[in-house]
Image (tube, grey):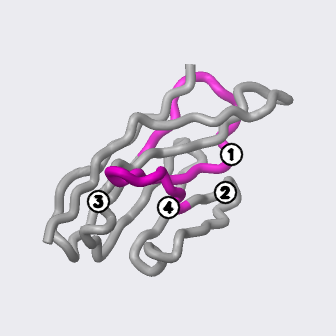
Amino acid sequence: QVQLVESGGGSVQAGGSLRLSCAASGTFFRVNDMAWYRQAPGKQRELVASISRDYMTSYINSVKGRFTVSRDNAKNTIQLQMENLNPEDTAVYYCNSRIESAIGEYESEYWGQGTQVTVST
């Protein structure tokens, strides 16, 4: 059974920083693309940042220059370093990953349980 376990959420004041982490655990062959999504109250879930297995990254415009996504392939982890946070960043943040369960198998999509990030003025 594959699980994505997140950590690092919390509450900060505007201008502060937080670092989110997510680790894939269980039995599988390979972790491919990884990403962070977020969902604010009353809004749809949106893709915040993604990183491929060969470290290519992408970000939504609103976080460019403030957020940095990284990963460790040896540990099957992804991180999101968030700087200069503002109240619009308040949301539940979800880790997402596409994982191959075995050699030659199609990859499946997995989600973490979500971690709350609250930014106050």
- Mark 4 to mark 3: distance in Å? 12 Å
Q: Mark 1 points at which residue?
A: 32
Does the CB distance between marks 4 and 1 fall below 8 Å?
Answer: no
Q: Position of residue 85 (x, y in %)?
A: 28, 71
CB within 8 Å, label 2 to label 1: yes
Which label is found at residue 52?
A: 2
How far apart marks 1 and 3 lie (CA) works out to 27 Å
Q: In which quarter of the image is residue 105?
A: top right
**In the image, residue 2 above or below residue 107:** above
Considering every residue shown, the one lying at the far bottom of the view is 65
Per the image, label 2 sits on a secondary structure element best described as loop
Helix or strand or loop: what does disc 3 sit on?
A: loop
Question: Which corner quadrant holds the C terminus?
Answer: bottom left
Q: How far apart are marks 2 and 3 (CA)?
A: 25 Å
Q: In which quarter of the image is the N terminus?
A: top right
Camera-side residue of 114 and 7: 114
Q: In this view, does 116 lie to the left or right of 3?
A: left
Q: Quote the CA–CA distance across marks 2 and 1.
A: 6 Å
Q: Residue drawn 45% across and 75% down?
A: 62
Reply above or below: 1 against 42: above
Q: Residue sitting at 68 percent across and 53 percent down?
A: 53
**Disc nearer the start of the sequence (2/1):** 1
Looking at the image, the residue that sits furthest to the front is 42
Amino acid type indicated by mark 4: Val
Secondary element under disc 4, as helix, strand or loop, is strand
Residue 108: image location, x then y, percent: 69, 32
Q: Which of marks 1 and 3 is nearer the N terminus?
A: 1
* Badge 3 amino acid: Thr
Pointers 2 and 4 in contact (C-beta within 8 Å): no
Residue that label 3 marks: 90
The image quadrant that residue 107 belongs to is top right
